[in-house]
Image (cartoon, rainbow, N blue to C red):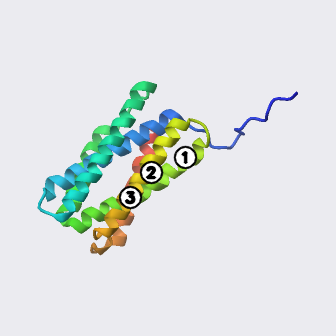
Amino acid sequence: MSAPAPRWRPGDSRADIPSMIRVDQAGEYGATRIYAGQLAVLGDRQPASRTIARMAFQEERHLTEFDRMMIERGVRPTVLQPMWNVAGYALGAVTALIGPDAAMACTAAVETEIDKHYEEQRLILGDDEPDLGATIAEFQAEEVEHRELAIQHGAENTFGYPILSALIRAGCRAAISLSKRI
């Protein structure tokens, strides 16, 4: 009786679990900082503030789960975390200063990239790491909900939306790439 063929073949993507957890924790941390910056500017004066506060609460829950996984699995955080602290807060504050629609445009752009990122991770994981895969799937669904809420709350009404969205999305892709490795 011969052994089953290995699932992985040279050239295939391999699941680098520590890298996945590191970048996901960094992303969720960045999201909490973006929302903190937005709420610091908007306060509770804007109708969008309640929506942002609810999304921030969910991002805190995501961060707590990835923090737990990092400790449990001995995964080191990205050394760029202090940069994501400042950059996330600044992005949130600046978009909120432009206005509530721009704050929502920021959310829509970020969540578009996070949806793609989580989908890529789920494909790489396949049936491996079912608990991690289920967590990513759950959080991905919430990120998609955030994007849809942002669009419903005026994201696309922002002056220069396509340019603002493209810039934020490019920044997200760069942050993802860097946080996987550094």
- CA distance separating discs 1 and 3: 18 Å
- CA distance separating discs 2 and 1: 10 Å
The quadrant where residue 145 appears:
bottom left
- How crowded pointer 3 is (Cα within 10 Å; few <14, some 14-19, many 20+) is rated as some
Q: Who comes first in sequence, dot 2 or dot 1?
A: 1
Relative vertical location of residue 147 with respect to residue 60 in this rendering, above or below? below
Q: In the picture, which quadrant includes the N terminus?
A: top right
Kindly identify which residue carries mark 1. Answer: 122
Q: Measuring from the top left, give residue 110's x and y in whole percent.
A: 37, 57
Q: Measuring from the top left, give residue 32's x and y in whole percent.
A: 28, 46
Q: In the picture, which quadrant includes the C terminus?
A: top left
Residue most extreme to the right: 1
The residue lying at 25 percent from left, 66 percent from top is 102
Which element is circle 2 on? helix
- Residue type for callout 3: Glu
Marks 2/1 in contact by CB < 8 Å: the verdict is yes
Kindly identify which residue carries mark 3. Answer: 145
Kindly identify which residue carries mark 2. Answer: 140
- Residue type for callout 1: Arg
Residue 174 visible in the shown view: yes
Q: Left or right of 78: which side holds 104?
A: left
The residue lying at 33 percent from left, 72 percent from top is 156
- How crowded pointer 1 is (Cα within 10 Å; few <14, some 14-19, many 20+) is rated as many
